[in-house]
Amino acid sequence: MALNIVIGTQWGDEGKGRVVDLLAAEADYVARYNGGDNAGHTVTVGDKTFKLHLIPSGVIHPHTTGVIGNGVVINPRVLLKEIETTRAAGVEITPERLRISHAAHIITPAHLALDAAREQARGEGKIGTTLRGIGPAYNHKTARGGLRMEAMLDLEEFAEGFKAHVEMVNEQLTLLYRAEPLDAQAITEQYLGYAHELTPYIGNTSIRLNQALRQGANVLAEGAQGTLLDLDHGTYPYVTSSTPTASGALVGLGLGASHVGRVIGVTKAFQTRVGEGPFPTEVFGETAERLRGTGDKPWDEFGTTTGRPRRVGWLDSVLLRYAAQINGITELTITKLDVLSGLENLYICTAYRKDRQTYSDLPLGPTDLDYEPEYEELPGWEEDIMGLRKWEDLPQTAQAYLRRIEAIAGVPIRLVSVGPERDQVIEVE
Ligand code: GDP
Ligand code: IMO
Ligand code: MG
């Protein structure tokens, strides 16, 4: 019994929610450890589709307890709305089933206003954030001036601290960014209401999880975003402000490293990215339209949180090998293999080239991706594979594509997903 960690190996949207839902069948606790409602995790169960931003994807299984850890930043308005819609879809969300860390930080409307003002001020150099206030909330956390969920446990003190926070940000908004100030009094009253509603969910989740692990429970940690969006190890500065990589699960849940069992890297069979920043294997035109889809299928590449069309490209195995190292990945789950059906040829980037020199690893990590990708061409397959459930039924060319990924990443593939439904999965021996 251990802590198993699910992380994205790319720029997010690898299908982590879908994989967490699958693995949660054997978990007692499912815990989000980083990010906030910039995440959009889609889970399809029968005729129901859940689009989760803050609630851990595993709570759809009634036997699990959900945890939102100290590493997460929480917009109370979004969380309450999500609790309501998830309940309306038939999932029981109670303060017993969903525990929120007292040490998680709060995202306020002032953080959203700052996110927008900063993006505008960056002009051409904008990051393309989700405008959910993520960066400013983590800024206040590291500057030791943030508001934590525990502040809600004393409503009078909460109101005082909240109002002072909005007034402080108002000064920045008006003086620095020439933006409109927020109505501190009105927002404080609104958030006091949210605090009242959320109080029963708040507690020390680190103690709870540590206790559970000692008693033999299975804890599944659900990463948001992906390795290449990691604040330290991603394509800085085009990253998010948290630690999506596996070590973030320890800090973000308050758990020791000795608990870690499996580190499951979720990798999309091709590459996508939302927002700005380098993307060496990006493709355009017809191939891009083919990989992205038109938006008529639920899994087509349009952002769950913002609806933005995702940038698409070929699988980058230089970056995958890097992700395997940074996270200590023990196994891979490949998602969306079905999307590649019907393409005559597939391409995997196996190395980078610059000034007539070839690099199979990144000299400076992914901050500097100013290289030409070198591709290996592999034959595709014609047939629809969404109905397949056995490795041996997969076309030879699909098997060869997967085996090549495995060899380059240096990590075994344990699962292959061929559709969004729970049963659309193939176990690899
Ligand atoms: P996450 O942010 O990593 O959880 O990923 P998203 O939920 O943002 O994006 C993944 C999308 O692909 C969702 O719409 C999933 O339902 C869908 N999906 C996941 N796995 C598969 C798969 O193997 N095949 C297909 N066609 N869709 C998938
Ligand atoms: P899930 O969990 C894809 C991207 C944004 C932007 C950058 C910084 O669904 O995989 P932020 O709002 O975090 O300050 O934006 O990070 N980004 C994501 N891209 N999937 C996500 O989450 C993302 N969360 C943030 O598009 O480029
Ligand atoms: Mg997503």
Image (cartoon, helix red, strand yellow):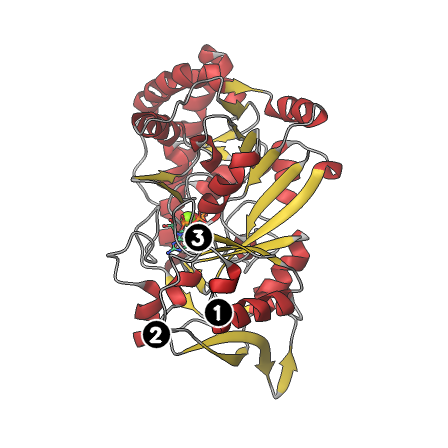
Relative to the observer, which residue lies in front, 245 or 157? 245
Residue at 27% over, 55% down: 297
Q: Find residue 49 and report its horizontal and vertical position in percent.
A: 32, 40
Q: Is residue 47 left or right of residue 334?
A: left
- From the image, which quarter does the N terminus lie in? top right
Amino acid at circle 1: Ala
**Mark 3 lies on residue:** 13
**Label 1 within 8 A of ligand 1 by Cβ:** no
Whether pointer 1 and pointer 2 mark residues with C-beta atoms closer than 8 Å, the reply is: no
Q: Is residue 161 left or right of residue 248?
A: left
Residue at 59% over, 32% down: 144
**Label 3 within 8 A of ligand 1 by Cβ:** yes
Residue neighbourhood size for the residue with mark 3, other residues' Cα within 10 Å, grouped as few (<14), some (14–19), many (≥20) = many
Please tell me whether mark 1 sits on a helix, a strand or a loop.
helix
Residue 359 numbered tag: none
362 lies above or below 190: below
Sequence-first tag of 1 and 2: 2
Whether pointer 2 and pointer 3 mark residues with C-beta atoms closer than 8 Å, the reply is: no
Question: Of circles 3 and 1, which is in front?
Answer: 1
**Mark 1 lies on residue:** 398
Q: CA distance from mark 3 to mark 1?
A: 22 Å
**Mark 2 lies on residue:** 287
Sequence-first tag of 2 and 3: 3
